[in-house]
Image (tube, helix red, strand yellow):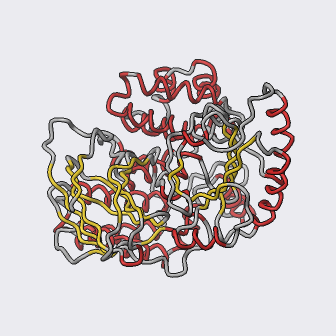
């Protein structure tokens, strides 16, 4: 059966554009009978993903779906913990294969990405981009030393050390300013030649807007890395250009161009106006106005993308008021100034709040060894200590031994749930079979394709303590060996007698 779904109101979609059918035909012979989902990346400032189509790999290893789409989108094909990324365009059909992990699992949580293999359709944008990415990676690997020199040459440390050496040789007077002519580094010429060759090589496909922007901003990032003057890059790639937040290379370039600006100017350069706008006034208009006079921040639409990107970054840095950052983003999300970018501000806000104390954990769906479904409602009204692990996590073993002791101490007061993040369901089954002595629930977390996002899991072991009303109790939950018992003592001792949380409903 072919499932047909409509991709709804995504970021910057125009409602007056007719939707067209997209057909996906996939082979996933290594994942027969396993659960999967199609997720769309809403924007590449927040990188927020949304599930648009769940599926199950058929008994013959087939995936077949139809989507209705009104714009080019970046999607993830996710089967349990295995993720392959592709680009889909309205009115196109795509044939692809999801390869097995081939021993990749067992390193980090990010080791589960695979490169989808595509059929040789002439109009498949994924093949064009794969070819270009290969050329780009080859070029940069060949010129890695040049890039390092170019990036160091832009730093103040390099300028000071170079001037000191020149002064020592007598080539310039130590007491005078260096007014010698700036010589254009050879690497800039090399990058420009690569750009010319790339545009000629891919000329036939440059009328495709997404592909054109992908290459254009990828090359812009290469120029930025090579030390091209910022004024030149601003004029060519930013000023009077519509933001392309759904294109990963645009956002990569913008992050490189404006990245870390708030942090460096607020502290290294003592720019009190940025600090005041974020930490005190918390108004989008004031922050936007403050930055409009800064070099290369004059173009409003790009400035607002950079504002959101920088707010996202500084939220995780010390010395900034997190409440102020969140309030500023809230104002961005409602300000007419941000217009079509309001959904991006909302997405950034949603992403930063996932790690906060008091965050209401979104509805999830896990299964156990017997394929029974577990959701938020399963543990409603109880304190729940989620312990995220994998079969290959060595440090998890010691933590699980400490967890056993906690389960004895807090029996009938706290629910302890082990959640496996193994990329493959069969590996999870083996994990359960090797831990039959564990007295609590051992669930498979990757039946929910957004488990990492919903629980803000970044590594293993990771722990999250949830209140009876489903909210995170701490920004960071201590592991068993880190003294979580001190926190649990405070919680269970203040609960009214007779309101214990023992056993599942």
The quadrant of the rendering that contains the C terminus is: top right
Give the quadrant of residue 238: top left
Q: Residue at (48%, 79%) from the top-left corner?
A: 142
Q: Quadrant of residue 128?
A: bottom left
Please provide percent x and percent y for residue 406. Answer: 82, 50
- In the image, 461 versus 445, the foreground residue is 445
* Quadrant of the frame with the N terminus: bottom left
Between residues 362 and 434, which one lies in front from this camera angle?
A: 434
Q: Residue at x 51, y 39 (%)?
A: 362
Residue under the image location 60 percent in, 34 percent down? 359
Residue 466 drawn at (x, y percent): 66, 39
Q: Position of residue 301 (x, y in %)?
A: 36, 35
Instruction: Give the x, y percent position of residue 151.
Output: 56, 61
Please give the name of the residue rendered at 65% of the width and 26% of the height, measured from the top-left corner.
272
How many numbered badges does the structure rendering display? 0
Q: Is residue 361 above or below residue 452?
A: above
Instruction: Say whether residue 49 is left or right of residue 11.
Output: right
- Asked which quadrant contains residue 437, the reply is bottom right
């Amino acid at each position: 059966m072919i499932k047909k779904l409509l991709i709804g109101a995504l970021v910057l979609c125009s409602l007056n554009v007719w939707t067209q059918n997209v057909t996906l035909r996939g082979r996933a012979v290594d994942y027969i009978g396993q659960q999967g989902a199609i997720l769309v990346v809403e924007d590449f400032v927040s990188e927020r993903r949304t599930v648009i189509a769940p599926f199950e790999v058929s008994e013959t290893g087939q995936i077949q779906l139809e989507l209705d789409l009104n714009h080019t989108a970046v999607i993830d094909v996710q089967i349990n913990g295995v993720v392959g990324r592709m680009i889909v365009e309205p009115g196109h059909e795509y044939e692809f294969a999801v390869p097995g992990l081939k021993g990749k699992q067992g390193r980090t949580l990010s080791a589960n990405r695979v490169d989808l293999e595509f059929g040789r359709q002439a109009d498949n944008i994924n093949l064009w981009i794969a070819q270009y990415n290969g050329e780009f990676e080859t070029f940069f690997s060949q010129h890695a030393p040049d890039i390092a020199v170019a990036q160091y040459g832009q730093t103040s440390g390099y300028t000071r050390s170079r001037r000191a050496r020149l002064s020592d040789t007598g080539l310039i007077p130590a007491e005078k300013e260096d007014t010698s002519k700036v010589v254009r580094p050879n690497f800039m010429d090399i990058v420009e030649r690569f750009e010319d060759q790339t545009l000629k090589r891919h000329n036939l496909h440059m009328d495709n807007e997404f592909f054109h922007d992908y290459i254009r901003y990828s090359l812009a990032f290469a120029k930025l890395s090579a030390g091209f003057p910022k004024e030149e890059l601003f004029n060519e790639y930013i000023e009077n250009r519509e933001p392309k937040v759904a294109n990963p290379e645009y956002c990569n370039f913008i992050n490189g161009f404006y990245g870390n600006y708030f942090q460096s100017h607020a502290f290294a350069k003592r720019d009190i106006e940025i600090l005041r706008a974020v930490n005190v006034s918390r108004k989008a208009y004031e922050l936007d106005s403050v930055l409009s006079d800064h070099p290369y921040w004059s173009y409003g639409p790009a400035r607002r993308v950079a504002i959101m990107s920088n707010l996202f970054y500084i939220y995780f840095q010390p010395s900034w008021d997190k409440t102020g950052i969140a309030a500023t983003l809230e104002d961005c999300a409602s300000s007419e100034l941000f217009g079509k970018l309001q959904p991006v501000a909302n997405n950034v806000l949603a992403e930063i709040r996932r790690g906060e104390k008091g965050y209401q954990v979104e509805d999830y769906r896990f299964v156990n060894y017997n394929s029974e479904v577990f959701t938020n409602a399963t543990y409603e009204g109880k304190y729940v200590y989620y312990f995220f692990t994998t079969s290959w996590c060595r440090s998890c073993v010691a933590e699980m031994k400490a967890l056993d002791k906690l389960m004895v101490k807090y029996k009938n007061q706290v629910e302890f749930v082990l959640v496996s993040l193994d990329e493959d369901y069969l590996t999870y089954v083996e994990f359960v079979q090797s831990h039959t002595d564990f007295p609590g629930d051992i669930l498979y977390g990757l039946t929910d394709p957004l488990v990492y996002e919903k629980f803000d899991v970044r590594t293993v072991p990771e722990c999250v303590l949830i209140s009876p009303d489903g909210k995170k109790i701490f920004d960071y939950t201590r592991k068993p060996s880190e003294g979580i018992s001190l926190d649990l003592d405070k919680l269970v001792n203040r609960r009214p007698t007779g309101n214990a949380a023992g056993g599942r409903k």
